[in-house]
Amino acid sequence: LNVAGYGHFTNDIMKPFLEGTNELQLKVLYSFAGYKQFSAVTLFRYDLSVAELKSVGPERVAGSHLVIPLRLKVAQPGHYEVTANLIAENTGRPVTHLSESLELTTKDAVLELKAHISVLKASNEYGPYVLKNFTGIRLPDKPDELTQYANLTGEYRIGSHPQTEYQDEEYVNERVKTKMKQFQNLIRLP
């Protein structure tokens, strides 16, 4: 394969993909105007995606939260963390960064991202939105395992809901609340 007459790739570049390895060595040979030939070699590692985003929505209001379901095709069960940005469709302004962490065990899983009414009020944005800039990782099960990445791409329109549909409750971070209780219990131990 020639690249604009400047160089070529051999069929060896496809060898790691065909053999099922996840390391690829890239070697570049070059010379300037007939002078001495130089080379550069690098090795990099790549991973196949452990999950794929199949669809988003439909969104709904549940209590004081806008709930956005993500349907995932999971190739490898485990503990996943997914994040995305919620952007106001009309203004392009960021509304909030959403994050959820969950054990996914089935091949077709649903993970829900939630935006609290207090965030929507603070931004004065009640939709429609665009959900984009996804990240997805599968956390290691054991200390010697590496973090793995999910293929979560696309931009998805999220509808609007009037402020009156939400319950106006103060935001409580349940994870922090649980950790605080555990910490307080530890302090009380004899």
Image: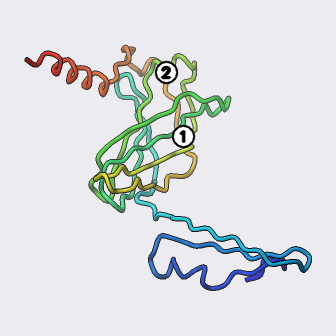
In the image, is 142 to the left or to the right of 184?
A: right
For disc 2, the marked residue is 119
Q: Is residue 76 above or below residue 22?
A: above
Q: Is residue 17 above or below residue 48?
A: below
In the image, is 175 to the left or to the right of 18?
A: left
Name which residue type carries label 2.
Val
Give residue 113's position: percent from left, percent from top.
41, 37
Label 1 neighbour load within 10 Å: few <14, some 14-19, many 20+: many
Task: Give SS at disc 2.
Answer: helix
Task: Give SS at disc 1.
Answer: strand
Name which residue type carries label 1.
Leu
- Viewer-proximal residue among 152 and 177: 177
How was the colour assigned to the protein in this rendering?
A: rainbow
Q: Is residue 10 above or below residue 143?
A: below
Give the residue drawn at x 45%, y 48%: 136
Tell which circle, 1 or 2, labels the residue nearer the N-terminal end.
Answer: 2
Q: CA separation, marks 1 and 2?
A: 15 Å
- Viewer-proximal residue among 155 and 152: 152
Give the residue drawn at x 31%, y 51%: 143
For disc 1, the marked residue is 131
| Residue 90, image quadrant | top right
Give residue 74's position: percent from left, percent from top.
36, 58
| Residue 175, image quadrant | top left
Decide: marks 1, 2 in contact (CB < 8 A)? Answer: no
Q: Residue furthest left?
A: 190
Give the residue drawn at x 34%, y 23%: 173
Give residue 2's position: percent from left, percent from top.
77, 81
- Viewer-proximal residue among 86 and 57: 86
- Viewer-proximal residue among 49 and 156: 49
